[in-house]
Image (cartoon, helix red, strand yellow):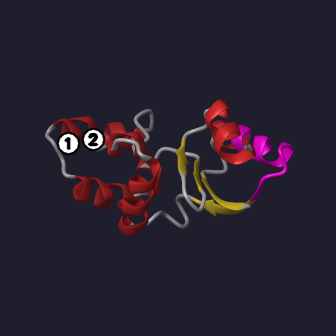
Amino acid sequence: MSVLFVEYPKCTTCKKAKKWLDENGVAYTDRHIVEDAPTAAELADWHARSGLPVRRFFNTSGMKYRELGMKAVLDADATDEECYELLSSDGMLVKRPIVVGDDFVLVGFKEEAWKEALLS
């Protein structure tokens, strides 16, 4: 199985996740989240396959999130489509890393969830 690994290379969590993939022999295609930001259509697909609320795709600890006042936008009941457009406008708004498999999407690095999805 090969997965798509969407990351920001300077992110320490992404580095840790990439090391975990390498140590566990998981094949992946690397994608830079800023240089090749996810499209609104990709985000809609990933959101549907993840089973997560769309808010989980936002990098809430990032400077861009705070600069743009995204919490207020989300609290004002932005639609999923509006969220996809916002997220696709700047890769730094997107939570990372993201792993996209054939039938799953993982957002953020939670080792137990990654073991379950990638090693079982």
- Which stretch is magenta? 16-27
Compared with 108, 26 (above or below) is below
Q: Nearer the viewer, residue 5 or 34?
A: 5
Tag 1's secondary structure? helix
- The residue tagged 1 is 73
- On the rendered image, what quadrant is the N terminus found in? bottom right
What secondary structure prevails in the magenta region? Answer: helix
Q: Nearer the viewer, residue 2 or 87?
A: 2
Amino acid type at mark 1? Val
Compared with 61, 79 (above or below) is below
- Write the residue at 24% across / 59% down: 81
- On the rendered image, what quadrant is the C terminus found in? top right
Q: Are marks 2 and 1 in contact (CB under 8 Å)?
A: yes
Quadrant position of residue 24: top right
- The residue tagged 2 is 70
Question: What is the x, y in percent for residue 15?
Answer: 72, 42
Q: Which mark is residue 59?
A: none
- Write the residue at 20% across / 42% down: 73
- Write the residue at 46% across / 56% down: 91
Question: What is the x, y in percent for residue 103?
Answer: 55, 58
